Amino acid sequence: MEIIREFALTFVPLFVAMDPVGNLPIFLALTQRIEPKHRRHTIHLAMLTALGVGLAFVAVGKAILLLLGIDVADFLMAGGIILLILAIRYLITGKAIETEDVSASETVGVVPLGTPLVVGPAVLASLLLLIGKYRIPIVLSSFVLNLVIQWVLFRQANRIVHVLGRTGTDALSKIFMLLLAAIAVKMIREGVLTVFG
């Protein structure tokens, strides 16, 4: 039961931070000029990039914090502020990142799809915070499962958007961003209580 609980507590923040449903309209906009067979290659490249960036950050993130003399409480507050800004920006402007027309580029799978769309500041901050509180194998399992979900959604992007409609997709994305904002506030509160508690 404890493993299931930890898995849920690590999976949900990563799912909200990654926002796989909210990424669909951006993914479609960036790949609309790419042929179907090349789009599949782009999806695979994006997922491999996201996995590599995430694993690298898990491997060296803590070492960087120790090297710079940054406490977990400091990162909690800084990460919480960044997540809150990203969430507020999305809720106000309707986009978390600028999506220039790079659909014809061969590197679209790496940038901006793999990073910062799939694994951006929100996911990296969440990963670093989660590995400080939970067992690394569980955090990594949650991270990989989220990537698999994102991969499936990208493969079925046209069908999902057709079923939900643009309005439905945008509505779900905004709900996820509200949850992300709430998680960000919780992180800031925990950081402040750790410092002044």
Image (cartoon, grey):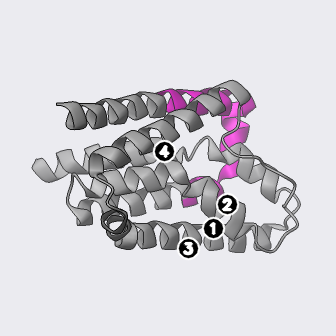
Q: What residue does disc 3 label?
A: 48
How far apart, in angstroms, are the residues tagged by discs 2 and 4? 15 Å
Mark 3 or 2 closer to N-term? 3
Mark 3 or 4 closer to N-term? 4
Mark 2 or 1 closer to N-term? 1
Residue 159 visible, this angle: no
> Is 135 left, or right, of 51 in this rendering?
left
- Give residue 172's position: percent from left, percent from top: 58, 30
How far apart, in angstroms, are the residues tagged by discs 4 and 1? 17 Å
SS for callout 3: helix
Q: Quadrant of residue 103?
A: bottom right
- Give residue 165's position: percent from left, percent from top: 72, 32
Contact between labelled residues 3 and 1, with CB atoms less than 8 Å apart: yes
Observer-nearest of 63 and 175: 63
Observer-nearest of 7 and 89: 89
Q: What residue does disc 1 label?
A: 46
Name the residue located 48 percent from the left edge and 61 percent from the top edge: 148
SS for callout 4: helix
- Graded by Cα atoms within 10 Å as few (under 14), some (14 to 19) or many (20 or more), the crowding at tag 4 reads many
Name the residue located 34 percent from the left edge and 46 percent from the top edge: 74
Contact between labelled residues 4 and 2, with CB atoms less than 8 Å apart: no
Q: Which residues are magenta?
A: 151-178
Q: Amino acid at mark 4?
A: Ala
Q: What residue does disc 2 label?
A: 113
Mark 2 or 4 closer to N-term? 4
Q: What residue does disc 4 label?
A: 17
Name the residue located 43 percent from the left edge and 45 percent from the top edge: 79
Contact between labelled residues 1 and 2, with CB atoms less than 8 Å apart: yes
- Give residue 80's position: percent from left, percent from top: 42, 38
How far apart, in angstroms, are the residues tagged by discs 3 and 2? 11 Å
Q: Amino acid at mark 2?
A: Leu
